[in-house]
Image (cartoon, rainbow, N blue to C red):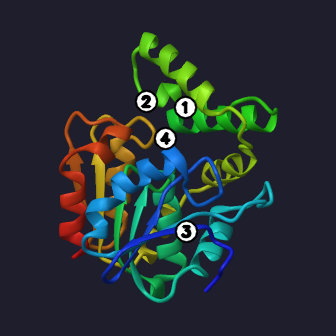
Amino acid sequence: MRDDLPRLTVGQGPPLVVLLFTPQAATPAGLARWSAMRMLRPFAERFTVHLLNRPPGLAHDTTMADLAALYAGGFEGPARVLGLSTGGSLAQQLAADRPDLVERLVLAGTASTLGPIGRRAQRAYIERARQGRRPSPALAGLLTPSPLARAFLSGLLWLSDGGADHADAATMLNAEDGFDLSGRLADIKAPTLLIHGEKDVVYPLELARRTAAGIPGARLTVYRGRSHSATFTDRRFAPDALAFLT
């Protein structure tokens, strides 16, 4: 098992590996840790949850397959896997490349490739980060369709970026920009549930439907009226994921 992968481990029970995108290549701290713990708490009641993160200092041309190979070294053995958003892209790559490590798979707010709106926003994030500018305002449009709310969120996101190095975050999003598992979905052998918001603009619902159809035996649960981020905060999310994982 690799010891250079940042990880947050909580709970007790069989292992559950959680994969998600974080701005920093580090074990979550401060507000990021509070947010992660809030999401993980229901799962930690049933599992030993390992929130794995990427090692810092990755090459700019790192691919999703490269990341999957790195994360595979963080597994102690076969485990259930929960992948959210960009972490869901990584979870698909891992499940296709290393089916021996994934017993059961829940994907949430993700698909086998990005949609056009999500791709534009993430490319803007990457460009800003590599120019040394605060990048997170580029993602505001993914969180709300309201121009007024978008302007407000852009300011908050700009403030949240202060003092941080976003090179590693840009590397992971760049890996997702080149990610398209559409032709390899049949390589995912684990029983799979995909949970998706009807109004997700990062990965449109039609892409989620195609993804679920391409994974043998996969199930798709759609939350009507929910956006990308609202999928993960929906009160049904943890119970639905836990029911499938257990």
Residue marked by disc 1 = 139
Q: Is residue 134 above or below residue 155?
A: below
Kind of residue indicated by mark 2:
Leu
Query: What's the CA distance linking mark 3 and mark 1?
Result: 25 Å
Residues at badges 3 and 1 in contact (C-beta under 8 Å)?
Answer: no
Query: What's the CA distance linking mark 2 and mark 4?
Result: 15 Å
Kind of residue indicated by mark 1:
Leu
- Left or right side of 18 for 176: right
Q: Residue at x 32, y 73 (%)?
A: 216
Q: Is residue 22 visible?
A: yes
Comparing 170 with 216, the one in front is 170
Q: Callout 3: 10 Å neighbours few (<14), some, many (20+)?
A: many
Q: Earlier in the sequence, mark 2 or mark 4?
A: 4
- Left or right side of 22 for 211: left
Q: Which numbered tag is attached to residue 7?
A: 3
Q: Position of residue 54 (x, y in %)?
A: 64, 63
Q: Which numbered tag is attached to residue 143?
A: 2
* Secondary structure of the residue carrying numbered label 2: loop
* Secondary structure of the residue carrying numbered label 4: loop
